[in-house]
Image (spheres, rainbow, N blue to C red):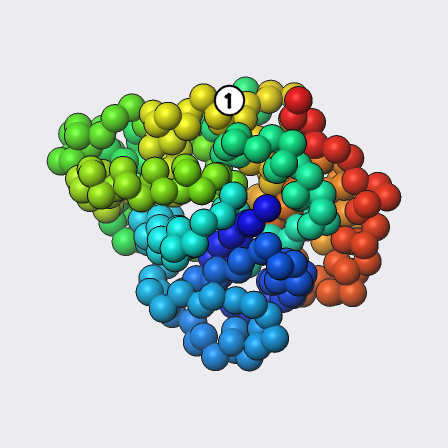
Amino acid sequence: MKIAYCILCHKVTNPLRFTVNYLSRFEGNRIYIHVDRKSDIAPFEEAFAQAKVTWLTERIDVAWGSVSQVDATLALLKAATQETFDYVFLISGDDIPIASHDQILACLERHKGREFIAYQDERFNRVDPCERVKYHYTDMFFKKRKTLMERVGAKLHGVGCRLGFFNNPFYKTLPRLYKGTSWFTVSHGASCFILKYLEDHPYYRLAFQYSFCCDEVFFHTILKQSPFNSNIIRDPECYSDSLRYIDWKTGPDYPRILDENDFANMKSSGMLFARKVDPDIDIGSLECFIDKTNEHYKENLFA
């Protein structure tokens, strides 16, 4: 089985070092990395000089919450689909595998043809995806840490939206919108369908130009109304349909920054990847963790 691992990152971290070096050991894996255009790529090339990596030359200046994250993901999908693979994983530089390579293959073989992309349901706090897209959001929204004036401006923007201002003129061209979590694992066919859909519907991407956190809506909407919809995994009893372990409950960070204290929960989750992991976590502890997964890993819950 051939797998394309598409990675979005902006700095060299220990989780990234571990993930790239581990996954690149196996012949059927291909690693594609998009480095944020704001970052110097030299440290990345130096850190992974011995790994089999394809570096994207089309680099996007990625801003949190903006459509730039979608554009960077599309650049990765375009690069990956130059080859034929069975599945593509979209992961970040904060992610680590919590199943061994053999366990990842076994899971995908067992559910071959299924799509692993999580949609909000009773396991999530519901967010209206339309609110993300039907208004024009300005640059101040694409900052995790806002000044007092920017926070006031965001409140006033919300009032303006309720009064009928800041409407997105392309919103009405869109199909019904669906929302889920950003990180997914989809088949080669689904990846190609996404890219072909955008060729055939040029206004779709334009409608998201000034949206907010649209990476949680953009791909989900396309696949939900595609021939691949019937293949999308949904199991309310499973931790996550996207095969990612993400702790939104424990804190103090949301999502929780994972470290060695979370290893037991990672193993028992039955998931294939975990995020977000402490950037300075000890690489030796990660290597020991992955070595032990064959003994303690819980089979994922999908039937």
Give the image location of residue 255, x and y in percent.
58, 44
Please give left or right for residue 173 compared with residue 109 in the image: left
Q: Quadrant of the rendered structure where residue 111 is?
A: top right
In this rendered view, identify the residue nearer to me: 38 or 85. Answer: 85
Residue at 48% across, 39% down: 186
The residue that label 1 is drawn on is 121
In this rendered view, identify the residue nearer to me: 196 or 130. Answer: 196
Q: Is residue 127 above or below residue 285?
A: above
Q: Is residue 235 above or below residue 106?
A: above
Residue at 62% across, 59% down: 27
In this rendered view, identify the residue nearer to me: 271 or 179. Answer: 271
Q: Secondary structure at mark 1?
A: loop
Please give left or right for residue 164 compared with residue 17 in the image: left
Please give left or right for residue 181 compared with residue 282 in the image: left
Q: Residues within 10 Å of mark 1 (few under 14, many from 20)?
A: few
Q: Quadrant of the rendered structure where residue 49 is?
A: bottom right
